[in-house]
Image (cartoon, rainbow, N blue to C red):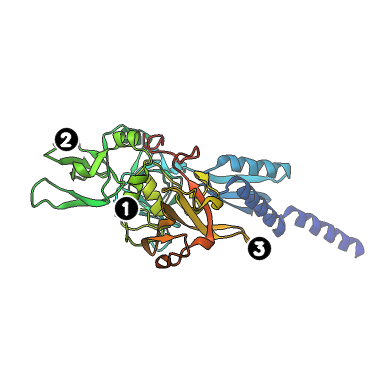
Amino acid sequence: MKFKALILIIIAGIAFSCKPAHHDIRISQFLIDSIKSQEIPDSRVEVFLIKASYIGNDLLLTGRTTKPEAVAKLEARLRQQQVSFTDSIVRLPDPALGDKTWALVNLTVANLRTEPAHAAEMATQALIGTPLKVLQKEKTWYLVQTPDQYIAWIDSVEIISLTASEIKAWKNSDRLIYLKDNGIILNSTERNARPVSDMVMGGIVTIDKNGKQKGSSIPVELPDGRKGFVNSKDCRNFNEWSAEVRPDTVAMLNCAFNLFGRPYLWGGTSSKATDCSGFTKNLYMMSGLILSRDASQQVAQGTEIAKEAIWKGLKAGDLLFFGRTATKEKPERVTHVGMYIGDSEFIHNSAWIKTNSLDSSRTNFKPYYHTNLLHVRRIIGSSNQPVSFKAHPWYN
Protein backbone atom coordinates (compact mmCIF):
# COMPACT_ATOMS: atom_id res chain seq x y z
CA MET A 1 0.00 0.00 0.00
CA LYS A 2 2.80 2.37 0.90
CA PHE A 3 4.49 1.58 -2.44
CA LYS A 4 1.29 2.26 -4.40
CA ALA A 5 0.75 5.51 -2.53
CA LEU A 6 4.30 6.59 -3.33
CA ILE A 7 3.75 5.81 -7.02
CA LEU A 8 0.54 7.90 -7.03
CA ILE A 9 2.35 10.82 -5.41
CA ILE A 10 5.14 10.63 -8.02
CA ILE A 11 2.63 10.47 -10.89
CA ALA A 12 0.68 13.43 -9.48
CA GLY A 13 3.90 15.41 -9.12
CA ILE A 14 4.86 14.73 -12.73
CA ALA A 15 1.38 15.71 -13.95
CA PHE A 16 1.42 18.91 -11.90
CA SER A 17 4.86 19.82 -13.18
CA CYS A 18 3.59 19.57 -16.77
CA LYS A 19 0.96 22.23 -16.08
CA PRO A 20 2.14 25.82 -15.63
CA ALA A 21 1.20 27.16 -12.22
CA HIS A 22 -0.89 30.31 -11.87
CA HIS A 23 2.06 32.27 -10.52
CA ASP A 24 3.93 31.66 -13.81
CA ILE A 25 1.34 33.81 -15.59
CA ARG A 26 1.83 36.53 -13.04
CA ILE A 27 5.60 36.37 -13.51
CA SER A 28 5.21 36.55 -17.29
CA GLN A 29 2.80 39.48 -17.04
CA PHE A 30 5.20 41.22 -14.66
CA LEU A 31 7.93 40.81 -17.29
CA ILE A 32 5.61 42.27 -19.95
CA ASP A 33 4.80 45.24 -17.72
CA SER A 34 8.49 45.85 -16.95
CA ILE A 35 9.37 45.82 -20.68
CA LYS A 36 6.51 48.26 -21.28
CA SER A 37 7.73 50.66 -18.58
CA GLN A 38 11.25 50.59 -20.05
CA GLU A 39 10.39 50.81 -23.75
CA ILE A 40 7.10 52.76 -23.79
CA PRO A 41 7.56 55.90 -21.67
CA ASP A 42 4.37 57.47 -23.08
CA SER A 43 1.44 55.21 -23.94
CA ARG A 44 -0.29 58.14 -25.66
CA VAL A 45 2.12 57.91 -28.60
CA GLU A 46 3.03 54.19 -28.60
CA VAL A 47 0.95 51.03 -28.21
CA PHE A 48 2.12 48.05 -26.17
CA LEU A 49 -0.95 46.13 -25.03
CA ILE A 50 0.30 42.58 -24.52
CA LYS A 51 -1.30 39.81 -22.46
CA ALA A 52 0.01 36.40 -21.41
CA SER A 53 -2.06 33.22 -21.13
CA TYR A 54 -1.43 29.51 -21.51
CA ILE A 55 -2.48 27.01 -24.14
CA GLY A 56 -1.32 23.63 -22.96
CA ASN A 57 2.27 24.02 -21.85
CA ASP A 58 2.99 27.02 -24.07
CA LEU A 59 2.76 30.66 -23.08
CA LEU A 60 0.53 32.54 -25.51
CA LEU A 61 1.31 36.20 -26.17
CA THR A 62 -1.57 38.23 -27.61
CA GLY A 63 -2.34 41.90 -28.12
CA ARG A 64 -1.03 44.70 -30.33
CA THR A 65 1.94 47.03 -30.48
CA THR A 66 3.50 49.81 -32.54
CA LYS A 67 6.97 48.94 -31.24
CA PRO A 68 8.16 45.53 -32.50
CA GLU A 69 11.62 46.05 -30.99
CA ALA A 70 10.00 45.99 -27.54
CA VAL A 71 8.43 42.63 -28.40
CA ALA A 72 11.86 41.38 -29.50
CA LYS A 73 13.27 42.28 -26.08
CA LEU A 74 10.37 40.57 -24.33
CA GLU A 75 10.85 37.38 -26.31
CA ALA A 76 14.61 37.39 -25.75
CA ARG A 77 13.98 37.54 -22.00
CA LEU A 78 11.52 34.67 -22.21
CA ARG A 79 14.04 32.55 -24.11
CA GLN A 80 16.66 33.32 -21.46
CA GLN A 81 14.23 31.93 -18.89
CA GLN A 82 13.62 28.91 -21.15
CA VAL A 83 9.93 29.72 -21.46
CA SER A 84 8.20 28.15 -24.47
CA PHE A 85 5.81 30.66 -26.08
CA THR A 86 3.63 31.35 -29.09
CA ASP A 87 3.69 34.85 -30.56
CA SER A 88 0.23 36.02 -31.65
CA ILE A 89 0.93 39.74 -31.20
CA VAL A 90 -0.34 42.04 -33.95
CA ARG A 91 2.30 44.49 -35.17
CA LEU A 92 0.66 47.75 -36.10
CA PRO A 93 -0.32 48.82 -38.70
CA ASP A 94 -2.43 45.66 -38.73
CA PRO A 95 -1.75 43.64 -41.92
CA ALA A 96 -5.53 43.10 -42.14
CA LEU A 97 -5.84 46.73 -43.26
CA GLY A 98 -4.26 45.87 -46.59
CA ASP A 99 -2.89 48.94 -48.35
CA LYS A 100 -5.30 51.40 -46.68
CA THR A 101 -2.88 52.51 -43.98
CA TRP A 102 -3.47 56.27 -44.29
CA ALA A 103 -6.45 58.59 -43.97
CA LEU A 104 -7.51 62.23 -44.18
CA VAL A 105 -9.90 63.84 -41.72
CA ASN A 106 -13.10 64.66 -43.61
CA LEU A 107 -14.94 66.73 -40.98
CA THR A 108 -13.89 70.23 -40.01
CA VAL A 109 -13.38 68.92 -36.48
CA ALA A 110 -13.25 65.18 -35.85
CA ASN A 111 -13.46 63.67 -32.37
CA LEU A 112 -10.91 61.00 -31.42
CA ARG A 113 -11.71 58.80 -28.44
CA THR A 114 -9.86 56.63 -25.94
CA GLU A 115 -11.91 53.55 -26.90
CA PRO A 116 -13.81 52.57 -30.07
CA ALA A 117 -17.16 53.92 -28.87
CA HIS A 118 -18.99 57.23 -29.01
CA ALA A 119 -19.57 57.04 -25.26
CA ALA A 120 -15.82 56.83 -24.58
CA GLU A 121 -13.80 59.79 -23.32
CA MET A 122 -12.67 62.24 -25.99
CA ALA A 123 -8.89 62.04 -26.20
CA THR A 124 -8.26 64.74 -28.78
CA GLN A 125 -9.53 66.25 -32.03
CA ALA A 126 -8.17 66.51 -35.56
CA LEU A 127 -8.98 69.16 -38.15
CA ILE A 128 -10.14 68.67 -41.72
CA GLY A 129 -7.30 67.70 -44.04
CA THR A 130 -5.15 66.29 -41.24
CA PRO A 131 -3.23 63.20 -42.42
CA LEU A 132 -3.57 60.19 -40.13
CA LYS A 133 -1.63 56.95 -39.94
CA VAL A 134 -4.14 54.09 -39.67
CA LEU A 135 -3.11 51.33 -37.26
CA GLN A 136 -6.07 49.00 -36.78
CA LYS A 137 -9.77 48.57 -37.49
CA GLU A 138 -12.45 47.38 -35.07
CA LYS A 139 -15.94 47.26 -36.54
CA THR A 140 -16.59 50.84 -37.75
CA TRP A 141 -13.72 52.36 -35.76
CA TYR A 142 -10.09 52.97 -36.66
CA LEU A 143 -7.14 53.28 -34.33
CA VAL A 144 -5.12 56.17 -35.79
CA GLN A 145 -2.06 58.27 -35.07
CA THR A 146 -2.08 62.04 -35.60
CA PRO A 147 0.90 64.10 -36.85
CA ASP A 148 1.80 64.93 -33.22
CA GLN A 149 2.02 61.12 -32.68
CA TYR A 150 -1.10 60.93 -30.48
CA ILE A 151 -2.95 57.61 -30.78
CA ALA A 152 -6.74 57.31 -30.41
CA TRP A 153 -9.88 55.89 -32.04
CA ILE A 154 -11.97 57.59 -34.72
CA ASP A 155 -15.25 56.63 -36.35
CA SER A 156 -14.90 55.65 -40.02
CA VAL A 157 -17.51 58.24 -41.09
CA GLU A 158 -15.11 61.02 -40.06
CA ILE A 159 -12.23 60.04 -42.34
CA ILE A 160 -11.39 59.02 -45.90
CA SER A 161 -9.12 55.97 -46.05
CA LEU A 162 -6.15 56.20 -48.44
CA THR A 163 -3.26 54.12 -49.71
CA ALA A 164 0.36 55.25 -49.48
CA SER A 165 0.27 56.31 -53.14
CA GLU A 166 -2.93 58.30 -52.57
CA ILE A 167 -1.51 60.16 -49.57
CA LYS A 168 1.58 60.90 -51.66
CA ALA A 169 -0.62 62.37 -54.38
CA TRP A 170 -2.35 64.50 -51.74
CA LYS A 171 1.01 65.81 -50.51
CA ASN A 172 1.89 66.77 -54.09
CA SER A 173 -1.45 68.50 -54.69
CA ASP A 174 -2.23 72.22 -54.49
CA ARG A 175 -3.73 72.77 -51.03
CA LEU A 176 -5.08 75.69 -49.04
CA ILE A 177 -4.80 76.22 -45.29
CA TYR A 178 -7.61 78.19 -43.68
CA LEU A 179 -6.29 81.10 -41.59
CA LYS A 180 -9.46 82.78 -40.34
CA ASP A 181 -10.73 81.47 -37.01
CA ASN A 182 -13.93 80.15 -38.62
CA GLY A 183 -15.89 80.39 -41.84
CA ILE A 184 -18.01 78.65 -44.48
CA ILE A 185 -17.37 76.79 -47.73
CA LEU A 186 -20.18 77.73 -50.12
CA ASN A 187 -21.50 75.63 -53.00
CA SER A 188 -21.36 78.48 -55.50
CA THR A 189 -20.38 82.10 -55.96
CA GLU A 190 -23.99 83.22 -56.31
CA ARG A 191 -25.75 85.38 -53.72
CA ASN A 192 -28.08 82.52 -52.77
CA ALA A 193 -25.20 80.05 -52.28
CA ARG A 194 -25.61 77.41 -49.59
CA PRO A 195 -23.04 75.98 -47.20
CA VAL A 196 -21.14 72.86 -48.12
CA SER A 197 -19.25 72.79 -44.84
CA ASP A 198 -18.00 75.08 -42.13
CA MET A 199 -14.25 75.72 -41.78
CA VAL A 200 -11.92 76.22 -38.85
CA MET A 201 -8.50 77.75 -38.44
CA GLY A 202 -5.79 75.36 -39.61
CA GLY A 203 -8.08 73.21 -41.76
CA ILE A 204 -6.65 72.07 -45.11
CA VAL A 205 -8.50 71.50 -48.40
CA THR A 206 -7.26 70.94 -51.93
CA ILE A 207 -7.80 73.34 -54.81
CA ASP A 208 -10.35 72.02 -57.29
CA LYS A 209 -8.42 71.77 -60.56
CA ASN A 210 -11.62 71.52 -62.56
CA GLY A 211 -13.17 74.61 -60.98
CA LYS A 212 -12.66 78.22 -61.96
CA GLN A 213 -11.82 81.06 -59.62
CA LYS A 214 -14.41 83.82 -59.69
CA GLY A 215 -13.15 87.05 -58.22
CA SER A 216 -11.95 86.30 -54.70
CA SER A 217 -13.71 82.90 -54.59
CA ILE A 218 -11.35 79.92 -54.94
CA PRO A 219 -12.78 76.51 -55.93
CA VAL A 220 -11.85 73.82 -53.40
CA GLU A 221 -12.44 70.13 -52.85
CA LEU A 222 -12.91 68.32 -49.54
CA PRO A 223 -11.33 64.89 -48.91
CA ASP A 224 -14.59 63.07 -49.79
CA GLY A 225 -14.98 64.95 -53.09
CA ARG A 226 -17.46 67.62 -52.03
CA LYS A 227 -16.76 70.89 -53.80
CA GLY A 228 -17.28 74.54 -53.02
CA PHE A 229 -15.69 77.97 -52.78
CA VAL A 230 -13.69 79.84 -50.12
CA ASN A 231 -12.66 83.47 -49.98
CA SER A 232 -9.03 83.94 -50.98
CA LYS A 233 -8.45 86.45 -48.17
CA ASP A 234 -9.26 83.77 -45.57
CA CYS A 235 -6.63 81.25 -46.66
CA ARG A 236 -3.22 80.69 -48.24
CA ASN A 237 -1.52 78.16 -50.44
CA PHE A 238 -0.37 75.53 -47.95
CA ASN A 239 3.05 74.93 -49.50
CA GLU A 240 3.83 78.65 -49.61
CA TRP A 241 2.53 79.19 -46.08
CA SER A 242 4.47 76.25 -44.56
CA ALA A 243 7.68 77.39 -46.29
CA GLU A 244 7.40 81.00 -45.11
CA VAL A 245 5.65 80.95 -41.72
CA ARG A 246 7.81 81.45 -38.63
CA PRO A 247 6.97 81.78 -34.92
CA ASP A 248 6.05 85.43 -34.49
CA THR A 249 5.13 86.85 -31.09
CA VAL A 250 2.86 89.60 -32.42
CA ALA A 251 0.97 87.18 -34.67
CA MET A 252 0.58 84.71 -31.80
CA LEU A 253 -0.79 87.38 -29.49
CA ASN A 254 -3.25 88.53 -32.16
CA CYS A 255 -4.35 84.93 -32.67
CA ALA A 256 -4.73 84.39 -28.92
CA PHE A 257 -6.89 87.48 -28.40
CA ASN A 258 -9.02 86.68 -31.45
CA LEU A 259 -9.99 83.48 -29.61
CA PHE A 260 -10.65 85.31 -26.33
CA GLY A 261 -13.75 84.02 -24.53
CA ARG A 262 -14.00 80.74 -26.47
CA PRO A 263 -15.18 77.89 -24.22
CA TYR A 264 -13.16 75.12 -22.62
CA LEU A 265 -13.70 71.62 -24.02
CA TRP A 266 -11.88 68.58 -22.68
CA GLY A 267 -9.93 67.13 -25.62
CA GLY A 268 -10.71 70.13 -27.82
CA THR A 269 -8.10 71.39 -30.29
CA SER A 270 -10.05 73.59 -32.72
CA SER A 271 -10.78 77.29 -32.83
CA LYS A 272 -14.36 76.45 -31.80
CA ALA A 273 -13.36 75.19 -28.35
CA THR A 274 -10.19 73.84 -26.76
CA ASP A 275 -8.74 72.54 -23.55
CA CYS A 276 -5.67 74.31 -22.11
CA SER A 277 -3.06 72.47 -24.21
CA GLY A 278 -5.31 72.50 -27.28
CA PHE A 279 -5.29 76.30 -27.04
CA THR A 280 -1.47 76.60 -26.90
CA LYS A 281 -1.25 74.00 -29.64
CA ASN A 282 -3.47 76.19 -31.83
CA LEU A 283 -1.33 79.26 -31.23
CA TYR A 284 1.86 77.50 -32.29
CA MET A 285 0.11 75.70 -35.15
CA MET A 286 -0.61 79.07 -36.75
CA SER A 287 3.10 79.85 -36.38
CA GLY A 288 3.96 76.70 -38.33
CA LEU A 289 4.95 74.42 -35.43
CA ILE A 290 3.27 71.19 -34.31
CA LEU A 291 3.30 71.14 -30.52
CA SER A 292 2.72 67.89 -28.68
CA ARG A 293 -0.86 67.26 -27.64
CA ASP A 294 -0.98 67.43 -23.83
CA ALA A 295 0.50 69.89 -21.34
CA SER A 296 2.54 67.09 -19.75
CA GLN A 297 4.07 66.46 -23.19
CA GLN A 298 4.51 70.10 -24.22
CA VAL A 299 6.61 70.70 -21.09
CA ALA A 300 9.36 68.57 -22.66
CA GLN A 301 9.64 70.88 -25.68
CA GLY A 302 11.61 74.10 -25.96
CA THR A 303 14.17 75.33 -23.43
CA GLU A 304 13.67 75.64 -19.67
CA ILE A 305 13.69 79.18 -18.28
CA ALA A 306 14.61 79.46 -14.61
CA LYS A 307 11.66 80.45 -12.44
CA GLU A 308 13.99 82.73 -10.52
CA ALA A 309 14.10 84.93 -13.60
CA ILE A 310 10.34 85.06 -13.85
CA TRP A 311 9.99 88.82 -13.36
CA LYS A 312 12.71 89.84 -15.79
CA GLY A 313 13.48 86.84 -17.98
CA LEU A 314 10.09 85.92 -19.41
CA LYS A 315 9.14 86.79 -22.97
CA ALA A 316 5.79 86.85 -24.70
CA GLY A 317 5.19 83.44 -26.26
CA ASP A 318 6.81 81.48 -23.42
CA LEU A 319 4.71 78.60 -22.13
CA LEU A 320 3.86 78.44 -18.43
CA PHE A 321 3.17 75.02 -16.90
CA PHE A 322 1.23 74.56 -13.68
CA GLY A 323 0.37 71.59 -11.51
CA ARG A 324 1.34 69.56 -8.49
CA THR A 325 4.85 69.84 -7.11
CA ALA A 326 6.74 66.66 -6.30
CA THR A 327 6.52 65.23 -2.77
CA LYS A 328 7.96 62.16 -1.08
CA GLU A 329 4.73 60.31 -1.81
CA LYS A 330 3.91 61.58 -5.31
CA PRO A 331 5.88 62.77 -8.35
CA GLU A 332 5.43 66.14 -10.03
CA ARG A 333 2.36 66.34 -12.24
CA VAL A 334 1.82 68.97 -14.95
CA THR A 335 -1.90 69.65 -15.32
CA HIS A 336 -2.24 73.06 -17.00
CA VAL A 337 -0.53 75.32 -19.54
CA GLY A 338 -0.86 78.92 -20.68
CA MET A 339 1.12 81.40 -22.77
CA TYR A 340 2.90 84.41 -21.31
CA ILE A 341 1.86 87.72 -22.90
CA GLY A 342 3.98 90.20 -20.90
CA ASP A 343 3.73 92.37 -17.76
CA SER A 344 3.22 89.30 -15.49
CA GLU A 345 0.12 88.27 -17.45
CA PHE A 346 -0.63 85.09 -19.38
CA ILE A 347 -3.49 83.87 -21.53
CA HIS A 348 -4.95 80.38 -21.12
CA ASN A 349 -8.11 78.34 -21.34
CA SER A 350 -9.65 77.68 -17.95
CA ALA A 351 -13.46 77.47 -18.36
CA TRP A 352 -12.93 79.95 -21.20
CA ILE A 353 -9.98 81.70 -22.83
CA LYS A 354 -8.96 84.53 -20.51
CA THR A 355 -5.98 86.32 -19.00
CA ASN A 356 -4.56 85.96 -15.50
CA SER A 357 -1.49 87.26 -13.71
CA LEU A 358 1.50 85.80 -11.87
CA ASP A 359 1.48 88.89 -9.64
CA SER A 360 -0.52 88.42 -6.43
CA SER A 361 -1.05 92.17 -6.17
CA ARG A 362 -3.20 92.16 -9.29
CA THR A 363 -6.47 91.70 -7.45
CA ASN A 364 -8.49 91.82 -10.66
CA PHE A 365 -6.71 88.68 -11.87
CA LYS A 366 -7.47 86.34 -8.96
CA PRO A 367 -6.55 83.49 -8.84
CA TYR A 368 -3.04 84.40 -9.92
CA TYR A 369 -1.56 80.88 -10.22
CA HIS A 370 1.92 81.79 -8.97
CA THR A 371 2.10 79.19 -6.21
CA ASN A 372 1.68 76.17 -8.50
CA LEU A 373 3.86 77.31 -11.39
CA LEU A 374 6.19 74.39 -12.17
CA HIS A 375 8.02 75.25 -15.39
CA VAL A 376 8.54 77.94 -17.98
CA ARG A 377 9.53 76.75 -21.46
CA ARG A 378 10.68 78.92 -24.35
CA ILE A 379 9.76 77.53 -27.75
CA ILE A 380 10.65 80.47 -30.00
CA GLY A 381 14.36 80.37 -30.84
CA SER A 382 14.97 77.11 -29.00
CA SER A 383 17.07 74.34 -30.55
CA ASN A 384 14.49 71.92 -29.13
CA GLN A 385 11.64 73.25 -31.23
CA PRO A 386 8.69 71.06 -32.21
CA VAL A 387 8.63 69.78 -35.79
CA SER A 388 7.34 72.29 -38.35
CA PHE A 389 4.68 71.64 -40.95
CA LYS A 390 7.34 72.17 -43.62
CA ALA A 391 9.59 69.47 -42.15
CA HIS A 392 6.87 66.98 -41.25
CA PRO A 393 6.93 64.05 -43.71
CA TRP A 394 3.17 63.50 -43.44
CA TYR A 395 2.47 66.89 -44.99
CA ASN A 396 5.30 67.34 -47.51
Marks 2/3: CA distance? 64 Å
Out of 62 and 273, give the one closest to the viewer. Answer: 273
Earlier in the chain: of badge 2 and badge 1, it is 1
Give how far across and how far down residue 100 sits, in percent: 38, 40
Crowd around label 2: few <14 · some 14–19 · many ≥20 (10 Å): few
Out of 67 and 239, give the one closest to the viewer. Answer: 239
Direction right: furthest residue: 2
Image-based side of 190 in relation to 136, left or right: left
Crowd around label 1: few <14 · some 14–19 · many ≥20 (10 Å): many
Tell me the residue at 60%/43% (across/down).
71
Crowd around label 3: few <14 · some 14–19 · many ≥20 (10 Å): few
Q: Secondary structure at mark 3?
A: loop
Q: Amino acid at mark 2?
A: Asn
Residue with the mark numbered 1 = 109
Image-based side of 99 in relation to 59, left or right: left
- Specify the quadrant that holds the C terminus: top left
Give how far across and how far down residue 283 sits, in percent: 37, 49
Q: Amino acid at mark 1?
A: Val
Between circles 1 and 3, the one closer to the viewer is 3
Q: Secondary structure at mark 1?
A: strand
Tell me if residue 89 can be seen.
yes
Earlier in the chain: of badge 1 and badge 3, it is 1
Earlier in the chain: of badge 2 and badge 3, it is 2
Residue with the mark numbered 3 = 329
Between circles 2 and 1, the one closer to the viewer is 1
Marks 2/1: CA distance? 26 Å
Marks 1/3: CA distance? 40 Å
Residue with the mark numbered 2 = 210
Tell me if residue 166 can be seen.
no
Q: Are marks 2 and 3 in contact (CB under 8 Å)?
A: no
Q: Amino acid at mark 3?
A: Glu
Q: Are marks 1 and 3 in contact (CB under 8 Å)?
A: no
